[in-house]
Image (tube, helix red, strand yellow):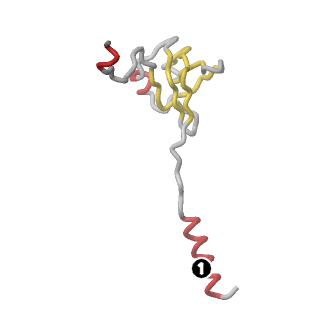
């Protein structure tokens, strides 16, 4: 390889190595039910719709008081890449889709 080609290859490798990609990928367990909330241990125990039971820590202890969920509530649990619970969304009893006039007839 000549000197110019070597410099180009090294430059490309340098810039490729300097690029850091991050991912916001998470794991979501929809259709889960809350089995227990332990504020002392800062964990939530839930059962997935597949029947698996998990006890995992929350990423932020504020989530325990803000989640407004209790035992047997149907929820969606969202985990970060470290398997910490980052969100608990209670399944609503009503659809969030607005009704149209044609549905009233």
User: What residue would you read off at disc 1?
Assistant: 8
Q: With respect to residue 34, does 3 lie above or below? A: below
Query: Number of callouts in the render?
Result: 1
Residue 99, quarter of the rendered image: top left
Mark 1: few/some/many CA within 10 Å (<14, 14-19, 20+):
few
Report the residue at 54% width, 38% height from top: 26
Spot occupied by residue 3 in the image (x, y as percentages of width and height): 64, 87
Judge by depth and name the residue closer to the eye, 97 or 47: 97
Spot occupied by residue 43 in the image (x, y as percentages of width and height): 53, 23
Q: Quadrant of the C terminus?
A: top left
Q: With respect to residue 2, does 74 lie above or below? A: above
Residue 36 horizontal side relative to residue 101, left or right: right
Report the residue at 62% width, 23% height from top: 54
Judge by depth and name the residue closer to the eye, 103 or 16: 103
Residue 77 horizontal side relative to residue 53, left or right: left
Report the residue at 60% width, 18% height from top: 47
Tell me the element at label 1. helix
Residue 57, quarter of the rendered image: top right
Q: With respect to residue 80, does 66 lie above or below? A: above
Judge by depth and name the residue closer to the eye, 2 or 69: 2
Q: Quadrant of the N terminus?
A: bottom right
Report the residue at 53% width, 62% height from top: 19
Spot occupied by residue 53 in the image (x, y as percentages of width and height): 63, 20
- Furthest residue toward left: 101
């Amino acid at each position: 390889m000549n000197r110019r080609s070597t410099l180009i290859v090294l430059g490309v490798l340098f810039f490729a190595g300097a690029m850091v990609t991050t991912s916001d990928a998470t794991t979501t367990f929809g259709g889960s039910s809350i089995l227990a909330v332990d504020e002392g241990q800062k964990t939530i125990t839930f059962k997935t719709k597949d029947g698996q039971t998990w006890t995992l820590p929350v990423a932020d202890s504020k989530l325990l008081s803000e989640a407004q969920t209790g035992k047997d509530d149907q929820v969606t649990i969202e985990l970060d890449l470290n398997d910490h619970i980052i969100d608990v969304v209670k399944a609503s009893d009503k659809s969030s889709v607005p009704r149209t006039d044609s549905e009233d007839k």
